Image (cartoon, rainbow, N blue to C red):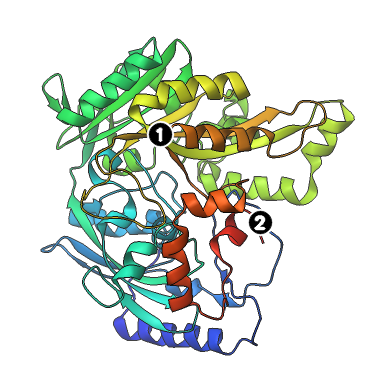
Amino acid sequence: MTGTVSPSDYQRRVEALREALLALAPGAPVRLRKPTSNLFRPRHAAHSPLDAAGFSGVLSIDPTTKTADVLGMTTYEDLVAATLPHGLAPLVVPQLKTITLGGAVTGLGIESASFRNGCPHESVIEMDILTGDGQVVTARPDNEHRELFYGFTNSYGTLGYALRLRIELEPVTPYVHLRHLRFNRMQECAAAIETICRDRSHDGEAVDFLDGIWFSPNESYLTLATYTAEAPRASDYTGRGIYYRSIQQRPEDWLTTHDYFWRWDTDWFWCSRAFGAQNPHLRRVWPRRWRRSDVYWKLIGLERRYGVKRRLDARHGKSPEEEVIQDIEVPVSRVAEFVDFLDKRTGIQPVWLCPLQQRDPDVTWDLYPLDPATLYVNVGFWSTAPLPTGETDGYHNRAIEEKVRDLCGRKSLYSTAFYPEAEFWQTYGGPAYEVLKKTYDPDHRLLDLYAKTVQRR
């Protein structure tokens, strides 16, 4: 676990990182070297001269104001471990333990509290940002760097790096009560999402968290979760039990708050099945400490490096497949249409459902604007789809981008993207981004957003 960092240590680390950036030769690539990543976007290998290892840790937690000062490379696993003893937690805790606070803010984080708390960037009070021109600025909604504050989200390190963030926290209880509701039609599920998010309750019980799974055209579930001080029992899905399967098997459940936050991490939602970790015989001997998303990530890395499975598939005559790993948001009124399209196009099952609404209707987040009056549903799907003869990567993913656009939605950029450049800048805040780039990275020491997320440099 990451420990507490003193303000003086933090300042020394800031100055050392800034000096390392300024010492780079003109034109040298500027990239941050960090121990973990949750990006599915491959890019050309390049030396990363800036070491972010010193920017993991908690500066302070204030139980009175319910705030925390946290370094940008702190994982949510460590952040939650530091806040829970105070009876507090971040307003939104992304699903995977090794997602960092800075990564969730400069990228995009969504979880089952997002229908009431929005995304992680919406609970940020201020940030220290190392910009592309080598300055360290404190960005707040009310100071001279307010444009950077509101434009930092979805910039993916192309304007600078968040070194310290002050965030809001909220009170939590020791347990969470879960109710799993089944629907036979996705249209019914979407209608229930809209009603529950509006009322923030169901059958007389408050709803603090809401997400769900679409398993097939005639089977989908919503999980309604509520903070509670006591529980008759607490399930544990770090052993032989598999969380997403429990949703089909029991109408209600209880988890500790800690285990609720990490309910998806043990099996990387359902993706651990690709590694055999859900096979009962293999699971029995697979150490618990290895049942976590970063271990599966390492296995993915080995496959990308050596291509053993790819070569075996080719040897056995298996048709090539395209990775279709995306999170998109569409209005709740269009989510059934999108899921139907995705199923017919790719056959991917299951998919994750998570409602999202902007927390403050008066704010515009320039690089990822959502209609604050609209309730969206995030649809997460992480698999592969067969490629027709003669087609290459982008065949399915580009069709998904076009469908999301037609449904007035947005797509996260943590994975592959295939947008034409003009469409990309129209979608992701081109004019506002250009002003920020000229202001905070005038010499283009950092890649621009299109080069990094679409061209994958």
Q: What is the quadrant of residue 103 in the picture?
A: bottom left
Other-residue count near label 2 (Cα within 10 Å), few / some / many at <14 / 14–19 / ≥20: some
Q: Is residue 372 above or below residue 451?
A: above
User: Of 171 and 105, which appears nearest the observer?
Assistant: 105
Q: Amino acid at mark 2?
A: Gln
- Who's the residue at 28% across and 41% down the image? 357
The label number, if any, that marks residue 218 in the structure image: none
Relative to the observer, which residue lies in front, 430 or 44?
430
Quadrant of the image occupied by residue 323: top right
Left or right: 209 as drawn, with respect to 214: left
User: Secondary structure under badge 2?
Assistant: loop
Farthest right residue? 315
Residue highlighted by disc 1: 330
Q: Is residue 222 above or below residue 285?
A: above
**As drawn, 90 above or below 403:** below
Identified by mark 1, the residue type is Val
124 with respect to 413 (left or right): left
Q: Nearer the viewer, residue 126 or 402?
A: 402
Q: Secondary structure at mark 1?
A: strand
Horizontally, residue 328 falls left or right of residue 383, namely left
> What percent of the width, then of the height, locates residue 106?
43, 60
Q: Would residue 290 be found to the left or right of residue 353 on screen?
A: right
State how far apart marks 1 and 2 are (Cα): 25 Å
Please give the residue where the numbered disc 2 appears in the rendered image: 455
Q: How many numbered callouts?
A: 2
* Mark 1 vs 2, N-terminal side: 1
Up/down of 105 relative to 236, above or below: below
Looking at the figure, which quarter contains the C terminus?
bottom right
Residue drawn at x 28%, y 25% as measured from the top left: 193
The answer to whether the residue labelled 1 contacts the one labelled 2, judged by CB atoms less than 8 Å apart, is: no
Residue 250 appears anywhere in the view: no
